[in-house]
Image: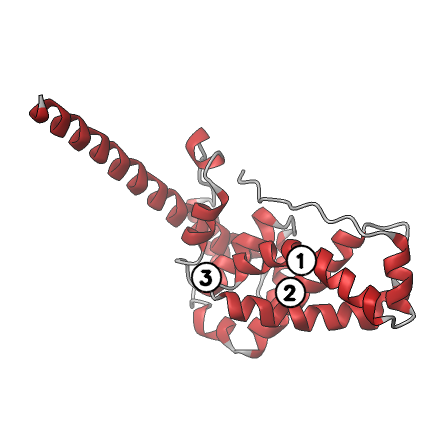
Amino acid sequence: MFRPLLLKMEIEKHIIDGCIRHDRRSQFKLYEHSYPYMMSIALRYRKDQNEAAAVINMAFLKVLNHLKNFDANQSIRAWMRRILINTIIDEFRKDGKIRKWNVNTDFDKEISMNGIHVDYNDAESNLHVEQLTEYIHQLNPLTANVFNLFVLDGYSHKDVGDLLEISEAASKWHLFTARKQLQEKIIQMQRTNESTVVSNIKIKEYEK
C-alpha cells in the first residue's frame, strides 16, 4: 500500500489556549505550524496550489471556530486533518462533480462478476509521493477522491460512501479503477525508464 508523506506538526498547548481566547498571535502561530502539513494533504485533492490554499483557509476558519470543542486528549493533527478533508469533500460536492463523474454502472453486479482486486508490487509501494500525486491528478476527480480517502487517509468504504454520497459498492468500484489505472501508469513509466537506460548505453557505446 502507498504511504503518504506525513509532515510533523507539533502544537504547544499554550498556542491552542491562545487561539481559544482569540489571540491573533496564537492564531498566526497555529496557522504557520499547520500550513505545511495541511498543504501536503490538500495538494493530493487539488492540483492547483491556489485552490489548495483556498480550501486550507476555509478549513482553518472552521478549526478556529470549533477549537473550544477540541478534546485535548486527542491528536490536534488528526482533528485538523479531518476538518480539512471534510471541507475539501464539501466543496467537491458543491461543485456538482460527483454526478458528472459517477458512471452509470451496476456496481454490485460488476463486483460479483469480476471481483475488485489489483495486486501490488514493490515498485508501486516505493513510488515517490510526488509521482504518486501526479498520477492521482490524472484520474477522474471522483475516482481520485475515493483513492485518496480510502488508501491514503484510511477511511472505510462506508465512510467514503457517506462523504461522497455514493454507495459502498461504487466506492469499491472507483478504488479498483484507480488502482488499475495507477498500475498501468507505473508499468508505462518503468518501460520508459528501461528504454531510456538502453538508449543511454547505446550512446555511450557509440561514443567509444
Q: Residue at x 85, y 66 (%)?
A: 67
In this view of the protein, can residue 139 be seen by the observer? yes
Locate residue 64, reporting x and y percent: 80, 70
Looking at the rendered image, the disc whose residue lies closer to the viewer, 2 or 3, is 2
Left-right relation of 19 to 86 = right
The answer to whether 40 is drawn above or below residue 47 in the figure is above
Locate residue 22, reporting x and y percent: 87, 73
Locate residue 40, reporting x and y percent: 59, 54
What residue did someone put label 3 on?
A: 106
The disc at residue 163 is 2
Query: The residue tagged with tag 2: helix, strand or loop?
Result: helix
| CA gap, disc 1 and disc 2 | 6 Å
Left-right relation of 202 to 52 = left
Q: Which of marks 1 and 3 is nearer the N terminus?
A: 3
Asked whether disc 1 touches disc 2, contact meaning CB atoms under 8 Å apart, the reply is yes
What residue did someone put label 1 on?
A: 159
Left-right relation of 168 to 124 = right
- Amino acid under disc 1: Asp
Which quadrant holds residue 158? bottom right
Which quadrant holds residue 119? top left
